[in-house]
Image (cartoon, grey):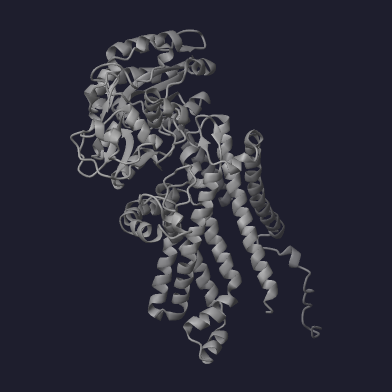
Amino acid sequence: MVPASGVDKVPAPNEDAEDFHLPSGLHFEGPFKILTRLSAILIIGVMAGIFLLLVLESVPVFHKFGFSFITASSWNPVSNKFGALASIVGTLATSFIAVLFGVPLALGSALFLNELCPFKLRSPLSTMIELLAAIPSIIYGMWGLFVMVPIMSHFIQPAMIKHCGHIPYVGGLFQGPPFGIGTLTAGLILSVMILPFIASVSLQAFATVPASLREAAYGTGANVWEVCRTVLIPFTKASLIGAIMLGLGRALGETMAVTFVIGNAHRLSVSLLAPGTTISATLANEFAEAFGDTYISSLLALGLILFLITFVILMITRMLFLYDKRRIPV
Amino acid sequence: MIRQVRTIGFLALSVMFTCFFHAVFAGDITGAGATFPYPVYAKWAEAYKAKTGISLNYQSIGSGGGIKQIEANTVDFGASDMPLKVEELQKDGLVQWPMVMGGVVPVVNIAGIKKGELKLTGEVLANIYLGTIKKWNDPAIVKINESLKLPDQDIAVVHRSDGSGTTFLFTNYLAKVSKDWMDKAGSNTSVEWPTGIGGKGNEGVANFTAQTPGAIGYVEYAYALQNKLAYTMMANHEGKFVSPLSASFQTAAENADWANAPGFYLVLTDQPGANSWPITGASFILMHKEQAHPDRAKTALTFFSWCFANGSKMAEKLDYIPIPGSVVKIVKSVWLKEIKGKDGNAVYTAE
């Protein structure tokens, strides 16, 4: 735009953009760019450093045991023979149970808070859900041990053994004495722990659905369930999957709560009611007192395996989501 | 200008702060290791500090951690429930001695069975932990407990999930009395348990045992008493059934032949003596033979000497067993002979 004559010449638009002068005369733009760049590099550097450390420490173990480290389930500190299978299976099993129970609960809570909840209760209830995330995991472990375990061992597990124990194919999942402690209980406690993460992200996601879409659906006569199924969830699919990934990531790495209630047994068993172990529980229990190069290397190799499992699962979930997005003609 | 003054002031404050902290901790004795003796060490340290003003900084990170830290020379002394073998001591230039003793007791949670009622032999206990005896009314258990009514209930075996000196003592005993156990699991601070659930720490085992019907676990004597768990009687080396009491731990310790154990490598399980408790053990202190800081070593040894002389009542109150006087004499002679400064002179001066 040409300035009218008589008015002071306005500086060209981009002239001073690179060189914003603060009143004190400091040129902050340059340092700011450098600092932010450094922060990003630092984060990547730390992650790469951790990965490198784990790989370097695990090399002797894989050299010694080879691939059988991942397929053997025997964990013997006396004869120095270690196998990670029981820990890996336990990690996957507890995380799977956690997601199985946690996701419906979390999505259900989020949908309730969004669609059905009376306005006055919305704020306090959503705050309470977010407060669940603030509870330290060791408190969850203690709650699990003192509250959930007796309930499981006195009521739920005996009922499961009685009614489901003899079903032809899945009955094997519900066998064994009802100790209360075991893979199933650990999975249930994890589901409570990941609930707030998934619920709060989903809640925010559902709030972004345009009112017009929602109203249109209600206007055509859909009831709440149909609106949720056909409008809310498909619209926010990307964020929901992101939320589930967040919860899954926490479940895979959760340590203290699991250690208290999983029974810490390096044995594979079909039954969900039997004690097991996870990679993080093994590390928490045994790292401080482990001595001997093979033992410590095996524990670090377990850490590497957990790192890789988390990475792979999150990558797969991302790929599924990307594939999905291309198909939706939005 | 103001900003520069503020920065300098902050730096000065930090320097003063660190100097202050350094001054406060300069007289500390530092140690790390076993969790089993931690309550008694803490009690002794408190009393010693009240008397002399020197404090003890003890980190109870477990026997394995204690051994690692003393080998890395980051602490004045390490504490371990598992004694190191003579070759290991020589390799690292360490000397070890027993400081306090305690017993490991099996505890059960069976309806109707009270403290000290159930009798077990080493063989039966090993088979329970191997998983070959699965129920409480198994003939092998019933045979030694004719007077008790044992239910048809699954045995819930509870063991330690973390590395522990208590596990070492327990498995050492089982390995001595059962060849099957020796072959299948062996003896260490952490073993491959054939069956059972793992609890974290003595507290975890006590908790699981108290909560699970039909459970059996093993804990340090103090935990059994404090948690009011039903402990069992055990058959000792002579075949006699004894109850876990201070007296039976004492007898096991007295019958131990410390004088002829090189490096004090003696595990007090399955000791002879009609009234000995079969799963007794000592907790050891490890120090370097050659001391780079003789004055720090002297402070530590003076503390230990004070504990030997004055700590017995405090230890007994906490359900530990003090080392007998005859053994203390041998320990002090080892100090004089083995722990030396760089100049070759003994660090410890007998009072």
**Residue positioned 42% across, 66% down in the render:** A129
Residue placed most toward the observer, A199 or A221:
A221
> Residue A36 appears in which quarter of the rendering?
bottom right
The picture places residue A263, in percent across and down from the top left corner, at: 41, 46
The answer to whether residue B146 is above or below residue B179 is below
Foreground residue among A223 and B343: A223
Q: Please state if B128 lies on the left or on the right of B18 as rendered.
A: left
- Residue A173 screen position, x and y as percent: 45, 55
In the image, residue A247 lies at what x, y percent? 52, 60
Whether residue B239 is visible to the viewer of this picture, yes or no, is: yes
Task: Tell whether A272 sits left or right of B235.
Answer: right
Image quarter in which the C terminus of chain A is found: bottom right
The residue shown at (36%, 17%) is: B302
Residue A109 pos. (x, y %):
44, 71
Tell me how many marks there are. 0
Q: Taking B53 as reference, is A272 above or below it?
A: below
Q: Say whether residue B311 is visible.
A: no
* Residue that protrudes farthest toward the left in the picture: B147
Q: Which of the image's four quarters has the N terminus of chain A? A: bottom right
The quarter of the displayed image where residue A187 is located? bottom left
Residue appearing at x 78%, y 74% in the figure: A11
Please give left or right for residue B334 compared with residue B240 in the image. Answer: right
Question: Which of the two residues, A227 or B38, is positioned nearer the viewer here?
Answer: A227
Q: In this view, does B183 lie to the left or right of B129?
A: right
